[in-house]
Image (cartoon, rainbow, N blue to C red):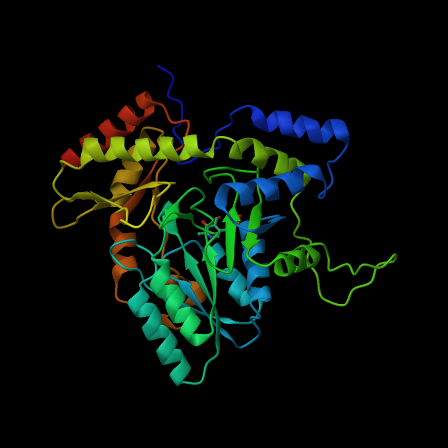
Amino acid sequence: MENKRIYLSPPYQNGREKIFANEAFDSNWIAPIGPQVDAFEREICEYTGALHAAALSSGTAALHLALILAGVKQGDDVVCSSFTFAGSAFPITYLGATPVFVDSEESTWNISPTLFEEAVISRKKIGKTIRAAVVVHLYGQSADLDPIAAICEKHGIVLIEDAAESLGATYKDRFTGSIARFGILSFNGNKIITASGGGMLVGKSKDEIDHARYLATQARDPAPYYQHTSIGFNYRMSSICAAVGRGQLTDIEFRVQRRREIFARYAESLLSIDGISFMPEAGFGRSNRWLTCMLIDPEKIHIGPEELRLSLEAKNIESRPLWKPMHLQPVFADAPAFIDGTSQRLFRTGICLPSGTAMTDAELDKTVSCIIVTLNGK
Ligand SMILES: Cc1ncc(COP(=O)(O)O)c(C=O)c1O
């Protein structure tokens, strides 16, 4: 039997990507402006309820611009979820600001409002200016935004939602990314929809998002010649990428449902094993279950996540450790951090299982049996 590799989260095509891409080719709108880019921005707004959007070359670029719009300057503090991918934190350093990492709460695996407040109070006490906060909706599960927003409001901190992994997830009936003053999305290859690569900055103010587009297009002033009054970036999305993204967005609800189904199948098959648990879904919204994340309790099961990963790999099945928290990254060794051990424990005991939209039931069965056989080994 063919041993086809089962990937963690490969792209899934529905066929409409090519229709939009052909429109771009046929009309010769293949440069990084034009109807495909405009339409993708509009359609993301229609789906998420965001008011304005700028399509960009990556989620990281979107976050960089959001931080600039928030007024982040050299020497400022920016509070950031520690349990995340580095793309949430790197842009803070591009501006010479200091990332202040905050640990997770158990119920969402996202930033703890209690530790968030502690971080804000303690940094202010030593005279730091906290300009912004990057709050991540990890693996498609929304953070508990209301208490965070209240703390931000009280202390004049601009809240930025990092919804790179959570398109289609909700918080109290609103789509993640569209709730705070700024939100960022990613369409890189492993996300729930891909634009082949790309990101989006969404926000509430037309002027701010227009300004982001200006900065993203090398800050070209409206003059007949090339004139610049600001430092700019080459951050716009290409029309071809936008066309691919548009095609993918047409069945986003199916994608969310399929990923939730995959999660449910893993949970049904594995939860009876003593010592296995999964990333919780908070009561205040819908997770898009971008990746199914499983925990193995070392007190009860003597096979660790790395042994399981290697055992899956031997069967040509891709899995991945959970994100290594930012406060444990060598590059951020000197960054201030407000930590209670939660994300470190999750990192040590967790694993991301294959969760692609196109994953078949047979592939799921194969993955589940490999997990059961491996965990029964000890
Ligand atoms: C939580 C998070 N933030 C930011 C990013 C950066 O997005 P991009 O890869 O599009 O730059 C990613 C994904 O890669 C992510 O998972």
In the picture provided, is 174 more to the left or to the right than 351? right
Please tell me which residue is depicted at 38% across the width and 75% down the height of the picture.
120
Residue 374 seen in the current view: no
Please tell me which residue is depicted at 41% across the width and 85% down the height of the picture.
126
Toward the bottom, the furthest residue is 126
Q: Nearer the viewer, residue 255 or 233?
A: 255
The C terminus lies in quadrant: top left
Residue 364, image x and y in percent? 30, 27
Q: Nearer the viewer, residue 102 or 321?
A: 102
Occupied quadrant, residue 5:
top left
Occupied quadrant, residue 26:
top right
In the rendered image, the vertical position of residue 234 relative to residue 291, given as above or below: below
Residue 177, image x and y in percent? 47, 52
In the rendered image, the vertical position of residue 122 relative to residue 217, given as above or below: below
In the rendered image, the vertical position of residue 315 relative to residue 124, given as above or below: above
Q: Nearer the viewer, residue 46 or 142?
A: 46
Toward the right, the furthest residue is 224
